[in-house]
Image (tube, helix red, strand yellow):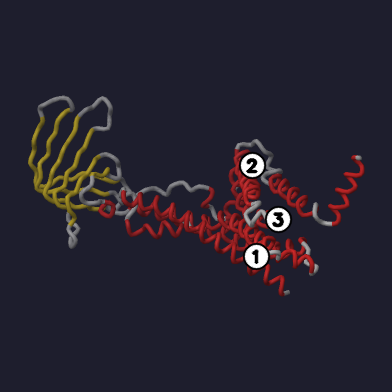
Amino acid sequence: MLIFRYLLRETLKSQIAVFLVLMAIFVIQKFVRVLAAATDGDIPAGLVLGFLALNMPVLASLILPLSLFLGIMLAHGRFYVDHEMAVMHACGVSEWYVTRVMLVLAMIIALFSALLTLWLAPLSMEVEYQLEERVSAESGLTSLIPGRFQQTANEKAVIFVHDIGSGDNQLERVFLAQQEQEEERRDFRIIYANFGSVQQEADGAEKLVLSQGLQFEGTKGQASFRKVAFDEYQVQIAERQAEHQSRKLAAYPTPQLLEDPSIEALAEWQWRLAIPLSLPLLVLIAVPLSAVDPRQGRFGRIFPGLLLYLGYFMLLMAGRKALETGGVPAVIGLWWVHGVMLIIGTFLIVRRRPLGVRMRARFRGASR
């Protein structure tokens, strides 16, 4: 039990360290993208952290297998370099015992991973969709940034606001440019008003109400234009509230996904299962590959291990694509990829077991 706890503790420490580092890298990348969207006015600044948090379950589910794989290789590589594994072997701890301990750890993490892929990740994606719809439907005032040219929500005009009053949200010194959408028409309309406001109608549409301004109407390529002074001018800047946009299968709750008979739904279901299933299979590969010569160092077999890992997940992605396009029968699905990895892992484990040694000796004897 002492060795069991020691192996679990050391491996878990390495895995958590790898997991946190990888999460930090991917979260920073995502944060930069979300921040850029907020800077462009696509999403309100107050929702940046919300969008970032909703991506956490998906990121965590993808990073968990890699963190376990690297955690085992780094921790067990240190055991070999520091001769701790040699001492364990001398005390009767076999590689198969170490593999079984790691399988216990992998099964625990697989349960957590299944919770993420089957429930939390689809739920977070659904909430993200709802948030995006709410942002697109909310008043355009929240997305207006003073001092920047921005396209209106219905993409029919460009607006520039010098300032927005902090108390009454009144727009000050508003510039608006409109152009006819039809290619054959070249009419344009330029408006400059001292004040303005955004009003939302009952059906969710939004209109910009301008006051105390001037309107210039003309045609492209012609010097003549018409100038009109107005006390109040209204223009619609957003259509009625956005319809419920179509969801990707990744946002479907798992029970709803299982009721969908389409081949795309089957591919998505098998993909959700693939991530937790990959964890014990990766253990079968990581444990034997971590057996390094002390002179090689603990990173001696990291590179071939990473190649195997990347090959596994690239095969899964290619298999999912083939399944969606009908290139692979639904019965086979993604199971063949797991079968290949199971054969490779079993071979790596058995080759150093007494059975594998006898088989190799018999094969060499037969070849002579």
Up-down relation of residue 361 to residue 18 (above or below): above
Q: Nearer the viewer, mark 1 or mark 3?
A: 3
Up-down relation of residue 196 to residue 14 (above or below): above
Look at 19% across and 42% down and name the residue there: 176
Mark 2–mark 1 CB contact (< 8 Å): no
Up-down relation of residue 53 to residue 337 (above or below): below
User: Which residue is the site of mark 3?
Assistant: 293
Look at 86% across and 54% down and name the residue there: 355
Q: Give the number of the disc on residue 108.
A: 1
Look at 7% across and 41% down and name the residue there: 229
User: Which residue is the site of mark 2?
Assistant: 319
- Of residue 242 and residue 13, the one placed in the foreground of this image is 13
Asked which quadrant contains residue 164, the reply is: bottom left
Q: Callout 2, which amino acid?
A: Gly
Q: Is residue 283 visible?
A: no
Asked which quadrant contains residue 261, the reply is: top right
- Of residue 59 and residue 306, the one placed in the foreground of this image is 306
Residue 198 position, x and y percent, is 22, 52
